[in-house]
Structures are given as C-alpha cells and as structure tokens.
Amino acid sequence: MNLINPSVSSPPYVDRKRHAWVLSLLVPTLVGLGPVLYRAWPTTLMLWLPVIFVYCVAPLIDLALGADTSNPPEDAVPQLEADPYYRRVTYALVPLLWGAFVYGAWFCMRTPLTWAGQLAIVITTGMVGGFCINLGHELGHKKSPVERWLAKIVLAPTFYGHFTIEHNRGHHRDVATAADPASSRMGEGIWVFALREMPGAFRRAWRLERERMKIDGLPFWSLHNELLQPALITVGLWAALALWLGPKVLVFLLLASLWANFQLTTANYIEHYGLLRRTGADGRLERCAPQHSWNSNHVFSNWAVFHLQRHSDHHAHPMRRYQSLRHFDDVPQLPNGYFGMFTIAYFPPLWFALMDGRLVEAVHSDPSRINFSPRRRAALMRRHGLVDSPGATA
C-alpha cells in the first residue's frame, strides 16, 4: 500500500533475480566443458580451464559485477517462499549434478590422460561434488520429506551424507564458539583447520544421531539411521561404477570426493572466521545473530551457490529459503565472493593479511568477540593492539 496515499496500492514485488536462478542448472557443465574443449584441442590445458575459471576468473567477474544489496520486502516473503518455481530449480539440479559426477568418472576412466589431465578431472568433478553439498545444504534445512530425501540423495555421490545431521543439529547450535569444529579461529590456517574440522564434523554427526536414536528407542544399526541411509546410496553408486568402469574408479571417486568435501571445509573456514558468540554473566551463550557470520553480496558467486553467501541471515533464520535471504548493512562483509575467498584461503599468509584486520574492525577491537587460535592469541593481541576488558576471559 502507498503510505502517502493509502488508496493507491503499491505494485506487486517482482524478484529481479527470478530467472537468473535457472542459470544455476549450468553448473554441472563444468565437468563437460573441459572434455569438450579437449576433443577439439587435445592439450591438457583444456581440461584445466574449468578449474581456472572457478578459482581465478569467477572472482574477477564478482569484482566487475559488484554487490547486490537489495532485499525483498517482508510482506512479499510468504508469497516468495510459497512459489514452487524456486523449489523446482533445486529439484532439477539434483539429477544434473549426479550425471555430471558420473560423467567425470567415466571420462577419466575411459580417456587416455596424463597425470595432470587426470588431476584436472578429479578437481573439476570434486568441484561439482562441492555444489552437491551446497545444494544438500539448501534442501536439508527444509521440513518437506521430499526435500530432505533429495538432500540425502545429492550428498551421496561424495560420501558426505552425514552433513545434514552435523550441520543442522551441531553446527547451527555451536556456531561461532570454541566448541564448534566447523568454526575457524583467528590465526588458524585452513590446512590446520581442515585437520580439526573434517574428522570433528563426522564424529559430531555420529554422536548426534546415536543420541537421537537412543531417545527415540530405535536400534542404531537400522534403516531408521539417517547416517546409514545416504551411506547405502553411496555404496550402491560406487559399487555400480566399479562394476561398469573397473575397480580403479574407486581411487578416482575417493580423490574427487575428498576435494568435494574439502570445498565444504573451505566454506566453513571463511563463513565464521574468528567470530565469537559471547557468554553472559549468567553463563548462557548469546543467541546466534547476523553479526556472527561473514557475508557477501557478490552477484555471480551468489547466483551459483543459491545465496549461501548471505550467510548472516541464514544462521539467524535457518528456515528461510534461498530466494528470500537478506543483506544486512551492519554485519562482517567479505571483500569478494566465495570463489575468490577460497583461492585466498589456500595461502594462509595472504588470508591473514587480508582478513585479520577486517576481523578486528568488524568486532570493534573487542577481543571478547574474537575466537582466537589458543596458541596464537597473545601474539595476535599484541599485533593488533587489543586489550582485554576487566573480567574478560581468554
């Protein structure tokens, strides 16, 4: 309604990005692009072009296109979330990602390649596996049985079916605390973080599902176990590929899945780097707020990952669908989209130089809001001129 003249109705909200989400269905073509170019120009460089595009060119596109800070009006959100179009896009992507993952395995097994060419296909297929996990993240947060089962199916190719349990029931509860293996600490490089996060996430998922089944009075080793359900899908897929392409494909699947799962680890690393929820005088942890996640509104990468980069709103309101996630002005902002930040994170000195000052600025130089690497806390406090307030705890 028009506030100046109540008798005049405001035009209905139109999502300007509505049709752009269909372009997300092109993500699986990353696996096919290299082989197509390789057929035309049979040099190994052709197989590496999708990798170069994602980690080097996409960040430049993000810089060129800039950020989109527009938000849907709140009165339009119920209609936006009820629109089946957005769900259909995610549904359609599930078989496309499966097909791309299988195609990568077939191409690598059936095409004579140098070790560098094989590595390129492993990484490209692993990138597609990373998009599987991203889609599983979006679907796994929903209450619909169809979406929750699609999440299990799309997580299965890379043997990462425990993700929904670990993420929904563990990470969202413990995020931005020292107890969370999926929240990185200031001064902690990604390679050190990965050694803590990857096994820690699996152990937490195992523990959470065991506790749930005990409460429900169900036997752990049964089909009621939501860890075993996607694992059985994985075993079936990998066994079928081994029968079709030979047992050597298992090495390919393990390596591609490792890289795919490491993409999730990298996302976790950049999403909450150094941010800490404080514990009040009553011993209770403050509620997770938008300020406890790093945000990015860069257009191109947000299109590719279903607004995952609007992570602040996601953690504050985890049930909101991707099309209605919002930008907030007063939350920590990343200087590039996820693709660019991934590349920087792989070089810890560069990451620290870029992000540590931003972290200190984001928390207004308050060390009680920083999740420090314990062994580097004193050095980082001195380097950034931080001082504990009276009564603060390390």
Image: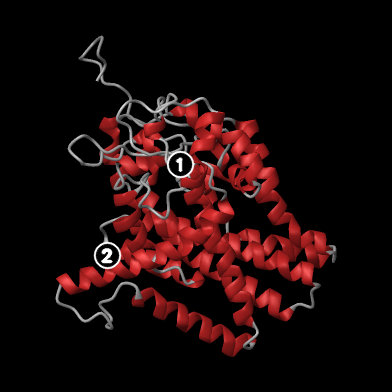
Q: Residue at x 57, y 33 (%)?
A: 335
Asked whether the residues under the numbered discs 1 and 2 touch, taking CB atoms below 8 Å apart as contact, a structural biologist would say no
- Placement of the C terminus among the 4 image quadrants: top left
For the residue pair 382 and 223, the one nearer the viewer reads as 382
| Alpha-carbon span between mark 1 and mark 2 | 39 Å
Please state which amino acid type lies under the numbered disc 2: Pro
| Residue 352 appears in the figure | yes
Amino acid beneath label 1? Phe
Residue found at x 43% / y 26%: 387
Percent x, y for residue 80? 32, 41
Number of marks in picture: 2
Residue occupying the point 59% across, 43% down: 341
Which residue, given by chain and number where applicable, does mark 1 sit on?
Answer: 372
Q: Percent x, y for residue 243?
A: 58, 90
Q: Nearer the viewer, residue 88 or 388?
A: 388
Q: Identify the residue position indicated by label 2 in the image.
A: 145
**Element at badge 1?**
loop
